[in-house]
Image (cartoon, grey):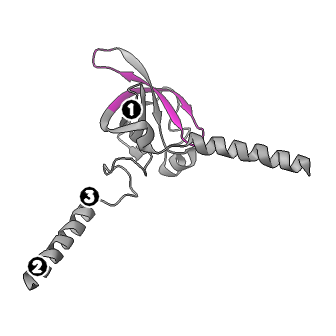
Amino acid sequence: MKLLCLVLSVAGLAAGVAIYAHHAFGAEFDPNRPLLLKGKVSKVEWVNPHAWIHLDHENEDGTTESWMVEGGTPNTLLRRGVTRDSLKPGTYIIVDGYQSKDLSNRANGRNITYADGTTLFMGSSGTGAPRDGADPTEPSRAEDVAKIEAVQESDEESEADE
């Protein structure tokens, strides 16, 4: 019985660490600091809760900087078409994303574009993530505008009836 309690306690602590390690977009990244990174992949970490792409970004002056780009979970990226075979070290990519709040060379990637022009959504969504149209699961801005206009028209009609 004591062994069972010990095993369950260790499992609970391990789960707590994993939950603590996960974060909302807004906790770590700045939706007001969009960026565009271009360069070759140097390494990919297919780990939970987020995959990390290490990229050698080419600056306009010809120098390079190493960046870490956070994506969704490995499973989510695979379902969106980002695979180990399509994202090998040496692959040239363009990442559209948002810089970390601490201004380090870390970013949350929203879209990844390959040399052939294929663009895939790779970013996280949810709490604090910008609604920029990159997430295919978010409602379009046109839908939002239509809803707002419908409410305004309804309000105007109600006022006219009074």
Measuring 51% from the left and 46% from the top, which residue is drawn there? 77
Q: Mark 2: which secondary structure? A: helix
Q: Marks 3 and 1: in contact by CB < 8 Å? A: no
Few, some or many residues within 10 Å of mark 1 (<14, 14–19, 20+):
some
| Residue identified by numbered label 2 | 159
Residue 53 horizontal side relative to residue 63, left or right: right
Badge 3 amino acid: Arg
* Secondary structure of residue under mark 1: loop
The answer to which quarter of the image holds residue 21 is: top right
Q: Residue at x 40, y 58 (%)?
A: 137
Instruction: Determine the CA span between mark 2 and mark 1.
Output: 45 Å
Please state, as top left, top right, bottom left or bottom right, where the C terminus lies in the image. bottom left
Q: Which circle's residue, 1 or 3, is located before the other in the chain? A: 1
Q: Is residue 58 magenta-colored?
A: yes
- The residue where tag 1 is placed is 101
Residue 38: x and y in percent read 36, 28
